[in-house]
Amino acid sequence: MPEPLRQAVHQLVSEAVMNCQEVLRYTEPDIARDWQRMTLIRATDAADTMDMASLLIAAYRQQYTDVEMDTLSSHLQVRQQRSRAAGPRESDRQEVAGMLGGPQPPESDADARRWYSWGQGYAEDGLMAEVDEQRLFTEACLHGLRARLCDDVDSLDRYLPPRVAEMARKVAEVLEEPQPATV
Protein backbone atom coordinates (compact mmCIF):
# COMPACT_ATOMS: atom_id res chain seq x y z
CA MET A 1 0.00 0.00 0.00
CA PRO A 2 1.44 3.39 -0.87
CA GLU A 3 2.54 5.27 2.24
CA PRO A 4 0.17 8.27 1.93
CA LEU A 5 -2.79 5.91 1.50
CA ARG A 6 -1.60 3.81 4.44
CA GLN A 7 -1.38 6.91 6.63
CA ALA A 8 -4.88 8.02 5.61
CA VAL A 9 -6.33 4.58 6.32
CA HIS A 10 -4.61 4.46 9.73
CA GLN A 11 -6.01 7.89 10.59
CA LEU A 12 -9.54 6.94 9.55
CA VAL A 13 -9.45 3.62 11.42
CA SER A 14 -8.20 5.42 14.56
CA GLU A 15 -11.02 7.93 14.25
CA ALA A 16 -13.58 5.15 13.83
CA VAL A 17 -12.23 3.35 16.91
CA MET A 18 -12.56 6.52 18.95
CA ASN A 19 -16.17 6.86 17.81
CA CYS A 20 -16.82 3.23 18.76
CA GLN A 21 -15.43 3.92 22.23
CA GLU A 22 -17.80 6.87 22.52
CA VAL A 23 -20.74 4.60 21.62
CA LEU A 24 -19.76 2.37 24.53
CA ARG A 25 -19.24 5.32 26.85
CA TYR A 26 -22.72 6.67 26.21
CA THR A 27 -24.24 3.36 27.29
CA GLU A 28 -22.93 3.82 30.83
CA PRO A 29 -25.38 4.92 33.56
CA ASP A 30 -23.60 8.15 34.52
CA ILE A 31 -24.33 9.75 31.14
CA ALA A 32 -27.48 7.86 30.25
CA ARG A 33 -29.45 11.09 29.94
CA ASP A 34 -28.16 11.62 26.41
CA TRP A 35 -27.62 8.03 25.27
CA GLN A 36 -30.38 7.95 22.66
CA ARG A 37 -28.92 10.80 20.64
CA MET A 38 -25.21 10.28 21.20
CA THR A 39 -25.03 6.52 20.62
CA LEU A 40 -26.66 7.03 17.23
CA ILE A 41 -24.45 9.96 16.32
CA ARG A 42 -21.19 8.22 17.29
CA ALA A 43 -22.20 4.87 15.71
CA THR A 44 -23.00 6.58 12.42
CA ASP A 45 -19.79 8.63 12.66
CA ALA A 46 -17.84 5.37 13.00
CA ALA A 47 -19.68 3.77 10.09
CA ASP A 48 -19.18 6.82 7.87
CA THR A 49 -15.49 6.98 8.74
CA MET A 50 -14.97 3.32 7.83
CA ASP A 51 -16.89 3.94 4.61
CA MET A 52 -14.40 6.71 3.82
CA ALA A 53 -11.50 4.30 4.41
CA SER A 54 -13.11 1.66 2.19
CA LEU A 55 -13.76 4.13 -0.60
CA LEU A 56 -10.22 5.51 -0.50
CA ILE A 57 -8.84 2.01 -0.93
CA ALA A 58 -11.40 1.30 -3.66
CA ALA A 59 -10.48 4.53 -5.48
CA TYR A 60 -6.83 3.55 -5.39
CA ARG A 61 -7.60 0.09 -6.77
CA GLN A 62 -9.82 1.53 -9.47
CA GLN A 63 -7.33 4.16 -10.54
CA TYR A 64 -4.04 2.28 -10.17
CA THR A 65 -4.69 -1.46 -10.46
CA ASP A 66 -7.12 -1.73 -13.36
CA VAL A 67 -9.58 -3.76 -11.28
CA GLU A 68 -12.91 -4.70 -12.87
CA MET A 69 -15.90 -2.84 -11.42
CA ASP A 70 -17.67 -6.13 -10.67
CA THR A 71 -14.68 -7.29 -8.64
CA LEU A 72 -14.48 -3.96 -6.83
CA SER A 73 -18.20 -4.05 -6.04
CA SER A 74 -17.79 -7.56 -4.71
CA HIS A 75 -14.91 -6.51 -2.46
CA LEU A 76 -16.92 -3.49 -1.27
CA GLN A 77 -19.76 -5.92 -0.46
CA VAL A 78 -22.31 -3.56 -1.97
CA ARG A 79 -25.09 -6.14 -1.77
CA GLN A 80 -25.13 -5.92 2.00
CA GLN A 81 -25.06 -2.11 2.06
CA ARG A 82 -28.20 -0.41 3.28
CA SER A 83 -29.01 3.22 3.68
CA ARG A 84 -29.64 4.70 7.10
CA ALA A 85 -31.79 7.29 5.38
CA ALA A 86 -34.51 4.66 4.97
CA GLY A 87 -34.65 4.30 8.76
CA PRO A 88 -35.14 1.13 10.75
CA ARG A 89 -36.72 -1.77 8.91
CA GLU A 90 -39.45 -4.05 10.19
CA SER A 91 -36.78 -6.65 10.93
CA ASP A 92 -35.02 -4.13 13.22
CA ARG A 93 -38.26 -3.37 15.05
CA GLN A 94 -39.01 -7.07 15.49
CA GLU A 95 -35.51 -7.76 16.81
CA VAL A 96 -35.88 -4.98 19.42
CA ALA A 97 -39.34 -6.28 20.36
CA GLY A 98 -37.80 -9.71 20.94
CA MET A 99 -34.99 -8.25 23.05
CA LEU A 100 -37.36 -6.23 25.21
CA GLY A 101 -40.21 -8.76 25.48
CA GLY A 102 -42.61 -6.92 23.19
CA PRO A 103 -45.59 -8.56 21.51
CA GLN A 104 -44.78 -11.47 19.22
CA PRO A 105 -45.58 -11.17 15.53
CA PRO A 106 -48.33 -13.39 14.12
CA GLU A 107 -47.40 -17.00 13.33
CA SER A 108 -48.17 -16.35 9.68
CA ASP A 109 -45.24 -13.91 9.41
CA ALA A 110 -42.24 -16.27 9.45
CA ASP A 111 -39.71 -13.57 8.61
CA ALA A 112 -40.85 -11.29 11.45
CA ARG A 113 -40.85 -14.24 13.86
CA ARG A 114 -37.29 -15.09 12.85
CA TRP A 115 -36.09 -11.55 13.69
CA TYR A 116 -38.14 -11.53 16.90
CA SER A 117 -36.56 -14.84 17.87
CA TRP A 118 -33.09 -13.44 17.11
CA GLY A 119 -33.80 -10.57 19.53
CA GLN A 120 -35.04 -13.02 22.15
CA GLY A 121 -31.78 -14.91 21.75
CA TYR A 122 -29.86 -11.82 22.73
CA ALA A 123 -31.96 -11.30 25.83
CA GLU A 124 -32.79 -14.82 26.99
CA ASP A 125 -30.17 -17.21 25.65
CA GLY A 126 -27.36 -15.34 27.26
CA LEU A 127 -25.94 -13.56 24.23
CA MET A 128 -26.29 -10.32 26.19
CA ALA A 129 -26.48 -11.63 29.75
CA GLU A 130 -23.37 -13.80 29.87
CA VAL A 131 -20.04 -12.12 30.34
CA ASP A 132 -18.13 -12.54 27.11
CA GLU A 133 -14.41 -12.25 27.81
CA GLN A 134 -13.62 -11.13 24.28
CA ARG A 135 -16.25 -8.40 24.43
CA LEU A 136 -14.98 -7.20 27.82
CA PHE A 137 -11.42 -7.16 26.53
CA THR A 138 -12.46 -5.19 23.44
CA GLU A 139 -14.32 -2.65 25.56
CA ALA A 140 -11.39 -2.36 27.95
CA CYS A 141 -8.97 -1.81 25.06
CA LEU A 142 -11.14 0.91 23.56
CA HIS A 143 -11.65 2.67 26.89
CA GLY A 144 -7.99 2.30 27.88
CA LEU A 145 -6.78 3.65 24.56
CA ARG A 146 -9.12 6.64 24.77
CA ALA A 147 -8.12 7.35 28.37
CA ARG A 148 -4.43 7.26 27.45
CA LEU A 149 -4.86 9.43 24.37
CA CYS A 150 -6.86 11.99 26.35
CA ASP A 151 -4.51 11.68 29.34
CA ASP A 152 -7.54 10.99 31.54
CA VAL A 153 -6.96 7.54 33.00
CA ASP A 154 -8.73 8.54 36.23
CA SER A 155 -12.01 8.88 34.31
CA LEU A 156 -12.10 5.11 33.85
CA ASP A 157 -13.22 4.60 37.44
CA ARG A 158 -16.03 7.13 37.14
CA TYR A 159 -18.15 5.60 34.43
CA LEU A 160 -17.20 1.98 33.79
CA PRO A 161 -18.19 -1.21 35.53
CA PRO A 162 -15.35 -2.14 37.92
CA ARG A 163 -14.09 -5.15 35.95
CA VAL A 164 -13.92 -3.23 32.65
CA ALA A 165 -12.35 -0.23 34.41
CA GLU A 166 -9.64 -2.45 35.89
CA MET A 167 -8.82 -3.99 32.51
CA ALA A 168 -8.94 -0.58 30.79
CA ARG A 169 -6.55 0.84 33.38
CA LYS A 170 -4.09 -1.98 32.61
CA VAL A 171 -4.35 -1.23 28.90
CA ALA A 172 -3.76 2.48 29.54
CA GLU A 173 -0.76 1.69 31.76
CA VAL A 174 0.84 -0.47 29.08
CA LEU A 175 0.35 2.32 26.58
CA GLU A 176 2.00 4.85 28.87
CA GLU A 177 5.49 3.90 27.76
CA PRO A 178 6.60 1.88 24.75
CA GLN A 179 7.18 -1.73 25.66
CA PRO A 180 10.05 -3.73 24.17
CA ALA A 181 8.99 -6.53 21.87
CA THR A 182 9.43 -10.02 23.23
CA VAL A 183 10.59 -12.92 21.13
Image (cartoon, rainbow, N blue to C red):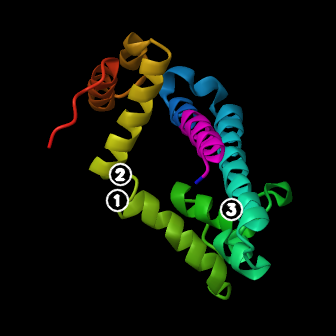
Q: Residue at x 55, y 63 (%)?
A: 98
Mark 3 residue element: helix
Write down the residue under mark 3: 93
Judge whether residue 14 is colored magenta.
yes
Inspect this view and state whether residue 180 appears.
yes
Q: Position of residue 179 (x, y in %)?
A: 25, 27
Q: Nearer the viewer, residue 124 or 36?
A: 36
CB within 8 Å, label 2 to label 1: yes
State the CA–CA distance, disc 2 to disc 3: 21 Å
**Residue visible at 52% across and 29% down?**
25
Left or right, residue 17 beside residue 34: left
Q: Determine the residue positioned at 72% across, 47% down.
A: 48
| 167, above or below 10, in the image | above
- Amino acid at the residue labelled 3: Arg
Residue type highlighted by circle 2: Ala
Q: Is residue 146 above or below residue 67?
A: above
Question: Which mark is drawn over residue 126?
Answer: 1
Q: Which residues are magenta?
A: 2-20
For label 2, the residue is 129
